[in-house]
Image (tube, coloured by chain):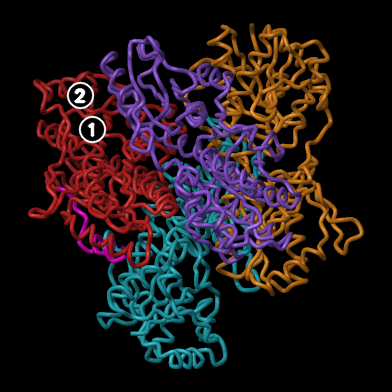
Chain colours: A orange, B purple, C cyan, D red
């Protein structure tokens, strides 16, 4: 079989482990040909192919990013995009596609599948908000990076008697904020799932600093928003591509805290470091398992499914079941974040 | 309520996160008193108590080991051990116990519970072989340490054209070996679940080195054993306390490989480094969630249960259900380890 | 002898190693009493003392920050500040002072020494710009943190075909930028020592992306400035305390690059993470050696000297020799950064 | 110019940084051709060449090992070895050689230079015992790895009330042991430079455990030896190639401690992990600077010199000056290790 392979959306650690697994298992177990497309769907539209061999995947298991390159590009939103996709697949005699990506890539995969192409998807996003799976590739490493940063900021907060505000990624869901917040021992965690009340926050900080502490850590997901009707108004700042402006919400919250409490308050925006570099074992393993499972799924004739982690097992989930859904942080995990503050 | 708290068995990263969560949540949410016992069940027998306050748990979230100390000690195996346990609990007016430990500690917990003591257990073991839960505290960090070591050994193997044999922990189950083997890109992974055939191994290595590689990594769990009837005989070496002698199986396998293939073959035994040091976020979070859940369980009147991770949820599992069971690496995960070799 | 001890200025990794060494060696070898002052010179002025015992230094060797707390506070700039210092020293019967700090703290030390107080200084600054010593405490760890961040950003740059601009600390000297730039394989490094020419930079990037690469890393010290007369004007943005506004120069440079080349260009400002967390062995060792040497120097009757690293040796340098000097990155190191671009 | 390049002896982190710098600077600045030899002097003897291009050095800066491969092979000890070297150099029209290695490789370089070949050497050895330079490539990373291991073992020692013995590399000099011992806060450090007295050690441990501690860390260099006339006799165990048998001395010392004190005493032998994996920034920078300096030295007509770090500068040292010398840990550094115990 000639299997096309692409990575779309933002890059993250663990993509190369998945690519490697698709190639090793696809070629080694079944004798398939794996045809990579460069830069996600853009490469399919442009016919930018890279036939993958054992040589390409040597030494990539512990490397970040994606050896195929990636881009935020949606063929169904471009004029003639889907036609160009079909033309390339035909020209390259691709019989099936494995698409590694987040929401956008998976949505495009559904559109292409509607044209009759066999597709298996592999979820990746450091935000971990893809429905239907416990974990997406990249999340565990991102939590690790964010936690290490909080650990570092912790010692500065304590030495200087400061309130340190740390902004992490998470537009629609606060998975990184909540997990890194718990792991880093943050006093306050703000997630999109639970609009915040700035009055409660400043009262809590004042109480804490009066009672027994001289510093505090506040972790904010970039998509956090204030509670309606609360004393702070704020509208999420978005850029020209609809992306959230890094640092906007944390600067705003820090200003409120500084003004209302008088505490020395500083902001750190983690930004791009959250999505790069050596993947944690968890993401290498998840990528490897997803890659093997995707190849097996195609071999068994499956299509329009996504590989997913459920507990200790890898399962297949219909793309239709997860379309348009965002996986939010469950209330009991938010509660742990608050209980240990 | 006066709640006793102990950590038993081998230490591991994430124990302090659990202790911290029990104290913060137990005191902060319910006003309980948390009475620590030093050095596991030994401290209960000897009445060695440490009443825990906010002061004890400051700054411990990212530290390895256990601030309570630990010991491999089973009260039910000692003369009058259980009586001494009951006497201490009465003297200290302990109304319930939270026991953090592996097989041995949990077994002792059942014995004490039979005497009418309310007990909630929290599973920890870097071997990850406690039944009923996806993860035990300490496992993710151990996999990370083992993977980092394999990454390091990888570059030496390649530079020197060697076969490098790496022995990791795992007496009855090969969780660390299989996970670190996949994450580290090992060519061969030997786990207790799947007795190995030394002939197949050496044939594979010879083929690989002839075909396209000049080095190989072999990861061995300390409890790995050869297949019956195969051309290598080996009986697991145990020490005076029944523990597996570190390095025995890997030295033996390395000798066979070197003799049969002529390849320059070296052994590294990871040993104690696998169980110490800064816990990965995953173990801090798991410890925190288990600690909160254990306190909640006692509050809800539960007893003889263990906190467990199932997918993304924390649940309670009756101790009776898991007694005497070992959780083995499932075949599909072993298959991924082999598929990507 | 009763020896006062303080840490002043911004915190950094390795301070606790120095404090620990002063206490262990001062008490253990000579039987001195070590009287800590909280929050730098502020604590001396306010008489905020913490007599240090073995208990205070337990487990601090691998921790970031300073257990004494620190503040940016200059007694000689405050009304009656030096008088208050002298009053506290007398009240506490302090016979000598060990001051751990950067420029500001060392300058204050000279002012206090003029009043007849015996003082030995220990240099710390992640900027590494204290004259007279090869290394100041904190620098090696900061370079490591910055390099790890560049490594992470590298994979994203490559996967997305981007120009990534990374701003690191370094107001007057570009030690972190140059070292992390070399270690991280940056294409361009901008340091205060060598005003940059934006035309050359954009021409180089255009050439590189045309010739053989699809991404670039630009590392900028916060104190970098454009060459006079070049086509980009920029004045360093400073805050209310004279500190450089984080991100200002890198945002400006990124905008120029994006506008002139059309490349997708993104900024990451490392900020506070550079100064916190677990110290690298180099900083623990340097702190330990400086602490021992400072105690020995006082024992030998020295004063108004600073401990310094010269090659493999610890030496003493008169404070007068280094007053008002900034140690700049030498041209040959700048050249290596450029040679390997 | 056609410049030959080889890496000899044991591999270590930072070699690829040096290779990359030689290629980038040699080709980019001077237009030289860089001809690599595989597996050290063995590759020269066998004519196993790899002409190096920009492609070979892409992405290697942060990778461990050596892309050229290495071997412990001395041409002057083999029949006709030097003649074979000369034949290859002539056949490949090599005008000068850059040799990266430790004692053995440098000695071979001198022998080849005697035949009229222009040679510049670059020192590498995790043992750091090459004379004439503050640092050799690989040392800083090895200290970091050893310290991280000691940090991990520390928490286990404390949780279990144990004496933990950690064996690190260092045959003739104890640089890793002393530096990692200071950084890891070891109670006792045994180095070849200072033969140990087992009676003093056990007395000290007994005193310490009686007085205030329940655990201890003992760091031993593999080449440590007991004092003559002391109550413990021991002869260094060497293997068939004259290499020290890993674990021999630490097992022996641990047995003495356990027998004499009754403390639960365990051994960890770090072994190969000390020499592999991602190089620390310090080794990437040192490798880069040495590589640039070696190319410059050849350009300036130098020969029979070694690049060396002295303080903050890179200098050239005649090979004749350092021949047969071992750089030992200076007494004042040993003293710091003891002072902070």
What SS does tag 2 mark? helix
Provide the residue designation for mark 2: D89
Disc 1/disc 2 C-alpha distance (Å): 9 Å
Residue A186 visible: yes
In percent of the image, x 75 and y 14: which residue is there?
A: A303
Provide the residue designation for mark 1: D97
What SS does tag 1 mark? strand
Tell me: A53 left or right of D200: right
Residue D52 in the image: x percent, y percent?
A: 36, 26
Mark 2 burial class by Cα count in 10 Å: few <14, some 14-19, many 20+? many
In percent of the image, x 36 and y 25: which residue is there?
A: B236
Mark 1 burial class by Cα count in 10 Å: few <14, some 14-19, many 20+? many
In percent of the image, x 54 and y 32: which residue is there?
A: B129
Badge 2: chain ID = D
Residue D74 in the image: x percent, y percent?
A: 16, 29
Tell me: D56 left or right of D297: right
Residue D26 visible: no
- What range of the chain is rendered magenta? D326-341
In percent of the image, x 68 and y 37: which residue is there?
A: B317
Question: Are dots 1 and 2 in contact, CB under 8 Å?
Answer: yes
In the foreground, D34 or C291: C291
**C277 in magenta:** no
Toward which corner of the image does residue D269 lie, by quadrant?
top left
């Amino acid at each position: 079989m000639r299997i096309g392979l692409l990575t779309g959306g933002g890059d993250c650690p663990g993509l190369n482990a998945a690519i490697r697994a698709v190639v090793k298992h696809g070629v080694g177990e079944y004798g398939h040909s794996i045809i990579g497309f460069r830069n996600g769907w853009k490469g399919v539209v442009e016919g930018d192919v890279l036939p993958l061999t054992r040589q390409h995947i040597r030494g990539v298991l512990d490397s970040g990013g994606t050896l195929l390159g990636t881009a935020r590009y949606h063929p169904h939103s471009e004029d003639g995009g889907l036609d160009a996709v079909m033309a390339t697949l035909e020209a390259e005699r691709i019989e099936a596609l494995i698409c590694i990506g987040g929401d956008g890539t998976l949505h495009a995969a559904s559109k292409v599948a509607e044209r009759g192409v066999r597709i298996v998807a592999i979820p990746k996003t450091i935000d971990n908000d893809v429905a239907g799976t416990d974990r997406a590739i990249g999340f565990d490493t991102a939590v690790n990076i964010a936690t290490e940063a909080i650990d570092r900021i912790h010692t500065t907060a304590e030495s200087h008697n400061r309130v340190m505000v740390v902004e992490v990624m998470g537009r629609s869901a606060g998975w990184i904020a909540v997990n890194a917040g718990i792991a880093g021992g943050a006093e306050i965690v703000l997630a999109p799932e639970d609009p915040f009340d700035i009055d409660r926050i400043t009262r809590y900080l004042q109480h804490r600093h009066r009672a027994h502490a001289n510093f505090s850590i506040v972790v904010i997901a970039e998509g956090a928003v204030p509670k309606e009707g609360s004393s702070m108004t704020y509208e999420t700042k978005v850029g020209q591509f609809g992306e959230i402006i890094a640092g906007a919400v944390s600067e705003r919250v820090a200003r409120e805290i500084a003004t209302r409490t008088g505490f020395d308050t500083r902001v750190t925006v983690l930004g791009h470091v959250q999505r790069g570099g050596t993947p944690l074992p968890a993401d290498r393993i998840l990528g490897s398992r997803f890659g093997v499972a995707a190849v097996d799924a195609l071999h068994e004739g499956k299509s329009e499914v996504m590989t997913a982690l459920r507990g200790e097992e890898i399962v297949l989930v219909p793309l239709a079941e997860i379309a348009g859904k965002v996986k939010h942080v469950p209330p009991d995990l938010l509660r742990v974040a608050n209980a240990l503050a």
